[in-house]
């Protein structure tokens, strides 16, 4: 099973090496990686997890920060769009491709918001000797958090362990845009971070709860995506992710009951009905199978 550090190295390398993956929303993306969505809310795609942003006259909000090398491009692009101060940074979870650029943005704000579990998860996953070099959330929440910036209200919610043990869902209430972080790898094999507190069954329940709270006009920002489908979509994408996780759990359960070894299980090349997930991507079905197997066997 790949460690979190190996996963991030492979993912970062894949996104950097493949030009067509430098933006995972080809139907909307602009040359500089910025895509405006609605009411001052947009995305930035370059290397790592999708950055969400809000630009208002009273301040700028950034959701996730990618890596130290790509974060300056995001900030410079935002500066071209607005001279408002950076009000805060929000982290959807603790993985390096979402928080690695925090230090870049720390030059412009001291407000970093994340779920209460994120600081400890960041410390636990840090490379040896780098814990003190990290920029951690300075404000945390347990269940919900809300604040108004300009004419937009941001609400953060935690639905329990899913992709990790600290996944925040960020709603731009007035724009009706929701950033779900890595709760959705849009038509792509996900990373199930068992060591970081993942729970694939509760992940399924969380996706259903989020889906039911949204409407057909909601724009959903995903953490990662198949280039054919992009990193933005609607609430129906949450159910595709749910269906994949359900099929994955069912496969592992059936194979365990049949006495199949883990190595034999991992020979599965594709789950029926989810062929679109099987593209040139840093993550694999075999890693997903092993993660759920580890959940079941402790």
Image (spheres, rainbow, N blue to C red):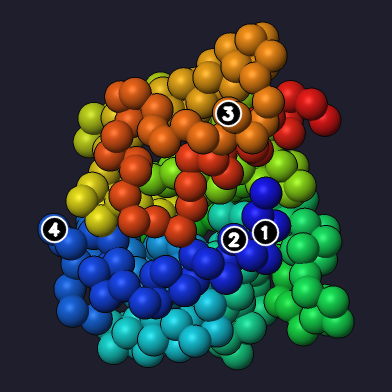
Locate residue 36 relative to residue 251 in the image: left or right: left
- Do the CB atoms of the residues marked 3 and 1 lie less than 8 Å apart? no
- For image coordinates 30% across by 67% down, the residue present is 21
Query: Tag 2, which secondary structure?
Result: helix
Tell me if I can see residue 83 in this picture: no
Which residue is under mark 3? 265
Rendered view: 272 above or below 56: above
The local crowd at label 3, few if under 14, some if 14 to 19, many if 20 or more residues have their Cα within 10 Å, is some
Rendered view: 211 above or below 3: above
Q: Point out which mark residue 7 bears.
A: 2
Q: CA distance from mark 3 to mark 1?
A: 22 Å
- Choose mark 1 or mark 4, whichever is in front: 1
The local crowd at label 2, few if under 14, some if 14 to 19, many if 20 or more residues have their Cα within 10 Å, is some
Which corner quadrant holds the C terminus? top right
Task: Depth check: give the residue in front, 279 or 204.
Answer: 279
* Residue 292 locus on image (x, y percent): 64, 31
Which residue is under mark 4? 27
Locate residue 215 relative to residue 265 in the image: left or right: left
* Residue 40 locus on image (x, y percent): 28, 64
- For image coordinates 71% across by 77% down, the residue present is 135
- Do the CB atoms of the residues marked 1 and 2 lie less than 8 Å apart? yes
Q: CA distance from mark 1 to mark 4?
A: 31 Å
Q: CA distance from mark 3 to mark 4?
A: 36 Å
- For image coordinates 55% across by 84% down, the residue present is 68
Q: CA distance from mark 2 to mark 4?
A: 27 Å
Tell me if I can see residue 101 in this picture: yes
Which residue is under mark 1? 4
Q: Point out which mark residue 297 bears.
A: none
Q: CA distance from mark 3 to mark 2?
A: 21 Å
């Amino acid at each position: 099973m790949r460690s979190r550090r190996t996963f991030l190295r492979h993912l970062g390398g894949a996104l950097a090496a493949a030009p067509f993956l430098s933006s995972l929303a080809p139907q909307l993306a602009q040359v500089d990686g910025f895509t405006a969505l609605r009411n001052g809310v947009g995305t930035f795609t370059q290397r790592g997890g999708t950055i969400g942003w809000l630009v208002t006259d009273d301040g700028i909000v950034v959701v996730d920060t990618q890596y130290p090398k790509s974060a300056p491009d995001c900030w410079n692009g935002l500066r071209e769009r607005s001279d408002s101060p950076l009000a805060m940074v929000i982290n959807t979870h603790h993985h390096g491709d979402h928080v690695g650029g925090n230090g870049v943005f720390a030059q412009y704000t001291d407000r970093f918001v994340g779920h209460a579990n994120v600081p400890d998860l960041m410390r636990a996953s840090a490379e040896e000797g780098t814990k003190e070099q990290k920029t951690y959330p300075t404000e945390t929440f347990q269940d919900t958090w809300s604040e108004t910036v300009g004419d937009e209200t941001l609400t953060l919610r935690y639905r329990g362990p899913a992709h990790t043990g600290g996944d925040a869902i960020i709603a731009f209430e007035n724009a009706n845009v929701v950033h779900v972080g890595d709760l959705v790898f849009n038509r792509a094999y996900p990373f199930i971070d068992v060591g970081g507190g993942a729970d694939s069954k509760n992940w399924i329940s969380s996706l259903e709860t989020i889906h039911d709270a949204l409407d057909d006009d909601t724009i959903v920002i995903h953490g990662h995506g198949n280039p054919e489908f992009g990193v933005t979509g609607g609430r129906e994408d949450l159910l595709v992710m749910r269906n994949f996780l359900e099929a994955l759990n069912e496969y592992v359960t059936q194979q365990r009951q049949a006495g199949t070894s883990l190595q034999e299980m991992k020979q599965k090349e594709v789950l029926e009905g989810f062929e679109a997930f099987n593209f040139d991507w840093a993550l694999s079905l075999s890693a997903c199978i092993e993660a759920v197997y580890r959940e079941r066997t402790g």
